Image (spheres, grey):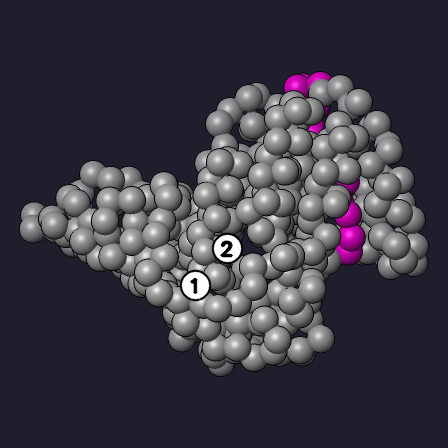
Amino acid sequence: MTTLNKTQPLKFGVLGTSKLSQRSLLQPARTSDYCEVVAIASRDPQRARSFAHRFGIPRTFDSYAALLDDNDIQAVYIPLPNVHHREWVLRALSSGKHVLCEKPLGVNADEVREMKETAAMHGRCLMEAFHHIHHPLLQQLREKVSTSLGSPKHIMAQLCVGPPLAPSNRDDFRFHYNMGGGCLLDCGSYVTCLLQFLFPGTYQVEQAVAKVIAENIDGAMDAKLMLPNATQTEISCSLIERCLPWSWRCRIEVCGTDGKATLSNFLAPNILSSLVVTTSSERIKSQILLNRNTSYDYQLNTFCDSVLFGKSLVWDLEDSLRNSLVIDDLYRTAGLSIRGA
């Protein structure tokens, strides 16, 4: 089992050569004092070498298992297709690694529960990579929701990332049930995560209507939820609605007894985002046109702080489990099978 030296950067290995790794780990790691990416594994040796050369990663492995067997590697990042998360998270934890896993952590609540128990058994940090909630603008939204708006009355949240922002190729894993695909599990999980971040607890699903584009695959979904405080909530998500970066639907609006807060572009808050809070006594607007510090930078810092210094996570495994339970209920209510069933 790997031993941590808290005076040295956390040594990361990456499973797979996903393009997502570049913005979610490799770029943030370059400016971090707390971690370094030292290895990458791929089932295609040439692909691993090419990726390593391009991004300056010193070591490559021809299999995921070989990387996990290396005791010099202390943490792994898993950006594999959804259906493979459970296997490699469990194997990484059993190898003594800390794990940063792309969302969704599991394709259903049972998988998340198993991973949560395994992380506790091995005493390792496991974090689901919902990057957006780590950004200061979303932290500011949570503070305003809890202190300035009074009791919540109604919430609306939407995220539609169709072409060209999302893959249009139906061979992509997002469009296949047996790969853990579906709009709700992909972009919709960002919406339900944000709701849990603001209002943690058990939600009641009142209605869910899916636009089915293949067997058991939702291309879009609209739903109504009741939050723990009896707040009516409407959510909408889509992988098929065409959109452009400057006109996509990506916002949340929280209306309370004492005011309203609206956040636009919550998924990439370092680019063209704004938070407007209006109460009877004030109107506050926080706007970001372009900031070099991304939500991925803050996410990586949170993970490293937890592993190296024992700090609390912004989004822990209990949050992940509650979120996955909501997603399972939404699929059932929409008349679709939960993923992985």
Judge whether residue 8 is colored magenta: yes
User: Along the horizontal axis of the image, is 122 left or right of 315?
Assistant: right
Quadrant of residue 205 in the image? bottom left
Judge whether residue 213 is colored magenta: no
Question: What residue lies at 49% left-to-right and 80% top-to-bottom?
Answer: 242
Question: What residue lies at 11% left-to-right and 48% top-to-bottom?
Answer: 258
Identify residue type, mark 1. Answer: Thr
Circle 1 crowding by C-alpha within 10 Å: few under 14, some 14–19, many from 20: some
Question: What residue lies at 67% left-to-right and 19% top-to-bottom?
Answer: 7
Q: Is residue 102 visible?
A: yes
Residue at the disc numbered 2: 328
Q: What x and y, as percent, mark residue 89?
A: 70, 41
Residue at the disc numbered 1: 333
Which is more toward the observer, 46 or 238? 238
Which is more toward the observer, 291 or 334? 334
Q: What x and y, as percent, mark residue 98?
A: 68, 32
Q: Is residue 162 visible?
A: no
Q: Quadrant of the N terminus?
A: top right
Question: What residue lies at 28% left-to-right and 40% top-to-bottom?
Answer: 143
Q: Earlier in the sequence, mark 1 or mark 2?
A: 2
Give the answer, above or below, for where 92 lies relative to 178.
Answer: above
Q: Quadrant of the C terminus?
A: bottom right
Circle 2 crowding by C-alpha within 10 Å: few under 14, some 14–19, many from 20: many
Q: What x and y, as percent, mark residue 194?
A: 40, 50
What count of labels does the image hold?
Answer: 2
> Which numbered marker is on residue 51?
none
Give the answer, above or below, for where 288 lies relative to 196.
Answer: below
Residue segment shown in magenta: 5-17
Identify residue type, mark 2. Answer: Asp
How far apart are the two marked residues, 1 and 2, measured between alpha carbons? 9 Å
Q: For mark 2, give the secondary structure.
A: helix
Q: What x and y, as percent, mark residue 26?
A: 68, 48
